[in-house]
Image: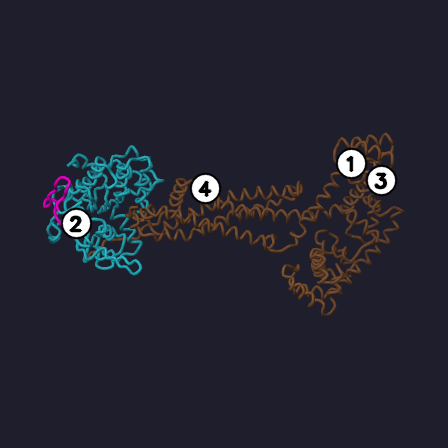
Amino acid sequence: MKTIDVKPQPKLSLARTVQVTLNGIRYRMFRSAVTMAVIAVAVAFLMNVMCEAVTFRAVGRAAIQRAAELQLADRWAARLSGVGSLEVVLEDVAAASGQPGLAEEMTRFGGLNAADFPEFQRRCGLAREFTVFLDQVGFARRRVLVGETAGAAALARLSRPGEFAKFAAAVKAMRTVRLPAADEAMADLTRTWPETEARLRRILAERNRAAVVVAGALQGRTPAAALAGARGPFGAAVADAGFSSFTPDLRARVAAQADDALLARRIEDLVQQPDLRKIMAGILDVMPRDVNARVLWEAMAGRAAAEKLVERMREKNCLPEGATAARIMGLARLRQEQQDWNEALRLTRETVSGGGFLGIGPRMTWLVLVSLLVCAVGITNAMLMSVTERFREIATLKCLGALDGFIMCLFLLEAALLGLAGGLVGGLAGSVVGFGRMAFQFGGLLWVAFPVGPWLISGLLAILAGMLLAAVAGVYPSYLAARLAPMEAMRIE
Amino acid sequence: MTGRKTQTGLNRIMPETTSPTTLTEPAALPAPAPAPPAAGAARRVIIRTLNLRKAYVKGTVVTEALRGLDTEIHTGEFIAIMGPSGSGKSTYFNMVGGLDSPTGGRVFIDEVDVAQLTAVELAFLRCRKIGYIFQQFNLIQYQTALENVTTPMAFAGTGPDEARVRGMELLELVGLKERWFHRPIEMSGGQQQRVAIARAMANRPMILLCDEPTGNLDLKTGREVLEILRQLNLERGVTIICATHDPRMLDMCDRLMWIRDGRIERLARRDEVTISIGKINNESE
């Protein structure tokens, strides 16, 4: 028996396959649009959740940083007054890595070796996270976990023998409670806590001793007032007393802030005086007894009110030195900003410290997964319909010499392309909705702390997720199409 | 025959599929099937089935569609297959077209045992050796006439430029050169079937399998389609196997084959059959 040369079919190029697929999608535009919409909705939900999560994180981080920044003068004033608690020192040590000089100062005050400081700081960081955890866990639970204690005292209690085991068991019993670190790390923290606490106490004591030295340079002023002149010899005196982290750059910032605070305080005091109070009531259009710091600063954010106040103060000859309408407006805005950041801090606290996928928590993760699953089923259904509708076409293509792989490729590509388009649309829609909601929640702070990088990464992830999802959901229908017998083309309905 | 005038043009398009024998003796009829293949030296057997059997199993019910068919079809033949629905006509078609595998017996296409071929080789066979024409035309709806014609060429690995030139020549052959950019929806049934013929001829097949090619067409367009088929058969020596109920088809073909209940009921040369108006010998409709 003679054999003719039957060679394997050449494979069709990807470009040509894509072209055929695109033609097919264009021809079935409406169906494709509906399939794409299913993907877009799921991806939009995912993107929305991710956008909110990254925004919460970014705003939360910015809020922590900004709050610390805005409280710089207050903190220094407190430090120099010799008041302070273990928790404050703990916070300072935990934050030491961000500020040059602070680590060195802490090492010296704590009588540590420079080499030991990183380990000490790590422990303090964890201890700080633990105190935040205790703050957030709620009163009833905290009572079960650590009794009436809080903060450093709670840690001291847990460091007693046998207490940690009880604590860990109690945490395990509360299914939804999650510790900031693994059990072993927590156990290590509590075991070494007495030593850490001793260091912290020493730092506190050394600080207070340095504050006593500084007190000589106060010349009868309060530390807050003296810090307004921190650019001059007072700043140098503070640094000389042992606060080596009080660098000239920091002095300038602290001085500016202290100056602002003093002026604000003066204005607030002035407005409490009866005649100015009446004038203010006239400007603000309220009853004189309702004039207080809050309404004052709310009103001073407007130029007209600020100018009027400055004018009246000049008339009364009680205008504080350096007070101009622009500066008063600036103070009012700064105050407003401070309030906004504090509010943001409150809103984002749980998210920043919370775990889970992107910090969105287990419930939201579950919701996202379910939505993606529903979407996958929807795509599979749509692709199955597309395949059954095109039985004749597929069979004809096979009669014309199409390989199974080509048919498979055709439908997988169709699904993936729809996934890509759906991902793009969904990513955009999800971003608009997500950031819209976040702008409503955080206002202008969102734009200050806008997470460009994380947003782009989430967008890429969302689009990729849409594409992958569609491709995976399209596997079975594509397989079905590829296996179709070519003789289906002969069938007549 | 109308073919004489366009013969040189056709030769230019597809010289290698046009065997000299069919050109010199276009009207020569093949020997009846039982005759040995040696009757005409140039007329080799292109399709041979030996005791072809096919049974479909659905659940516990076994349906025997073909019960031992022995057929021989020669190159350049135009053979019409007739039979009532359920007779096994379609099954025979699928077997001969390499679309399905038999449960018993053998099918040789151009001396190659179809059962021995892999899926990829079968795709090769379908792509280059056989052209399919369907009752429902089965054009790809979202492709233009030219794209429809060039799709099988792409599967065969022909470059896009060459495919375009050859596609246009084929469209010219079926008289639709001016409408190459039209989509199937913009064309009449006859025009669609002509595009389908051009597509079937895309890779210069040796065999054209037509499943009721005029079934969905009116008398006039049906005739045009039949004439094109006959022309291809005579001028290029393409073997045409045609399932039909169309009496005009019977008038054109070389041989007739009746299938009933999975067996060949009758096999006859065209000149042995008498056709009366509205009624065909041995065929009650």
Q: Which residues are magenta?
A: B265-281
Please tell me whether mark 4 sits on a helix, a strand or a loop. Answer: helix
Query: Within the magenta stretch, is there residue B278?
Result: yes
Give the residue at mark 4.
A33
Give the residue at mark 2.
B258
Please tell me which of labels 1 and 4 falls first in the chain: 4
Give the residue at mark 1.
A328
Q: Drawn colour of chain B?
A: cyan
Estimate the spatial distance between the alpha carbons at disc 3 and disc 2, rounded to whole Å.
115 Å
The residue lying at 45 percent from left, 52 percent from top is: A473
Q: Residue B210, image x and y in percent? A: 23, 45
Q: For marks 1 and 2, give the one nearer the viewer.
A: 2
* Above or below, B67 relative to B131: below
Q: Quadrant of the N terminus of chain A?
A: bottom left
The color scheme shown is by chain
Same chain check for tags 1 and 4: yes
Please tell me whether mark 3 sits on a helix, a strand or a loop. Answer: helix
Q: State how many labels appear.
A: 4
Q: Residue A396, image x and y in percent? A: 31, 46
Quadrant assignment, res B183: top left
The answer to whether residue B24 is visible is: no
Estimate the spatial distance between the alpha carbons at disc 1 and disc 4, rounded to whole Å.
56 Å
Farthest residue to the right: give it: A220
